[in-house]
Structure formats: structure tokens, C-alpha cells
Amino acid sequence: MNYKLLPLSIFLLLSILIIRTTMAGDIKGKIRLKGSVRSAGILVYIEHVDSTFTPPQKHAVMDQKDLMFVPEVLPILAGTTVDFLNSDNVLHNVFTPSKCAGSFNLGTWPKDKIRSHIFTKAGCFATILCDVHPDMQAWIAVLQNPYFAQTNKSGDYEIKNVPPGKYNLIVWEPFYETKTLHVEIKKTGVSELNLILKRKSQ
Ligand SMILES: [Cu+2]
């Protein structure tokens, strides 16, 4: 052991610890699904932020393409309008049995047409179905605040510019166990939160 290098080693170790444990403005990390190579589209969101948020003018989009809803999970801020497209050469329908979304049925429409719905109730996870194709299924997560993200193909996510406070950070995937992590955000810096989700027991 070279004792001249000891202070430097301690400094580097402390720096790493500080970077790892400072809970601040941005949250990022990596989520994996146990027993699966798939890592994309996992939803990470802050449950509640003490403020009110204006929904975006821009509509969110859920397409129906190759007999699938795209994306499978669509997170939106409460009050956002969702445009449901049909990009297939067959008729598709959109309905939800979820009471929190008003159990609506938008009817059936052909390729390149759009029908829309406004999702107003925060905390509602609406199951979206097509009565023409029973295998089609998607979810719209209606969230209280805009501090949410979805993982990319590598499982990485990032939520930027979160106001300081203590929060529940929720990791949600329809077929895996939902996890809640406690996070304290300070004025600056990055919190790193990584997780492996277990599949729901059948
Ligand atoms: Cu369909």
C-alpha cells in the first residue's frame, strides 16, 4: 500500500459516495425485468408533487399498427387529450372498461382516421382494448405531474428538473410487480435509482 495515495483514494471514494447518495434535481437509473431481455417502455414516475400542472396543448398519440397498440404503455399528465390513430388496413375499435377513465367506447374506424379522448383523473391506469381484436391491449397512465419517464432499450431512464422534496418514485410495468422507492430531491445534482422488477405471480 502506498500511503501517499491514501488521501487521494479516500477523496475519490467520498466523491463516488456523494454522487451516489446526493438526492437532487434529476433522477436517473436503470430498470431491468427479472428473467427478461426486454427493458424498454417501463414507466417511472413521481406519485405526487405539491403543485398543479397545466396539461400540454399538444395531444398524446396512441396508434394501432400491425394489430398492436403503439405504445403499449402511454403515460400522460392528467387533462391531456389522446389521439387514437388507426394505421392498419383493417377496422379497429378503442374502448376501456376502466371506470376511472369513464368506461368509454369510441367506436370503430378505418385507416388514417383519428378519434380522441381527454383523460382527466390522475392516478387512473386505464386498460385500452379493441373489440375487433381481443389480443390487443394497452395502458394509459394518467399522472398527477409531468415528472415521469420511460426506459429506453437499455433500461435507462431520466427524469429532469424535479422540484426539491421527498417523494414516492413508482416503477410500473403491467406484467411486473409495482415498486415504490423513496427519494429526496435537493436543489441540484443527480439521484441514481436502479431496480430489478419481479414478474407478477399468476
Ligand atoms: Cu383492433
Image: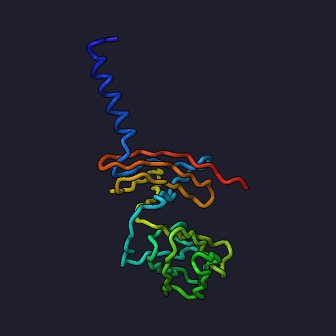
Q: Residue at x 31, y 28 (%)?
A: 12
Question: In which quadrant is the N terminus drawn?
Answer: top left
Furthest residue in direction front, as rendered: 50
* Vertical order, 174 against 118 (above or below): above
Q: Residue at x 55, y 88 (%)?
A: 110
Q: From the viewer's perspective, is 119 left or right of 200?
A: left
Question: In which quadrant is the C terminus drawn?
Answer: bottom right
Picture coordinates of residue 46, whole percent (x, y): 46, 58
In which quadrant of this rendering is ligand 1 seen? bottom right
113 or 127: nearer the eye?
Answer: 127
Q: Residue at x 32, y 32 (%)?
A: 15
Residue 71 can be seen in this image? no
Q: Residue at x 57, y 86 (%)?
A: 106
Picture coordinates of residue 132, whole percent (x, y): 66, 82
* Vertical order, 60 against 20 (above or below): below
Residue 120 can be seen in this image? yes
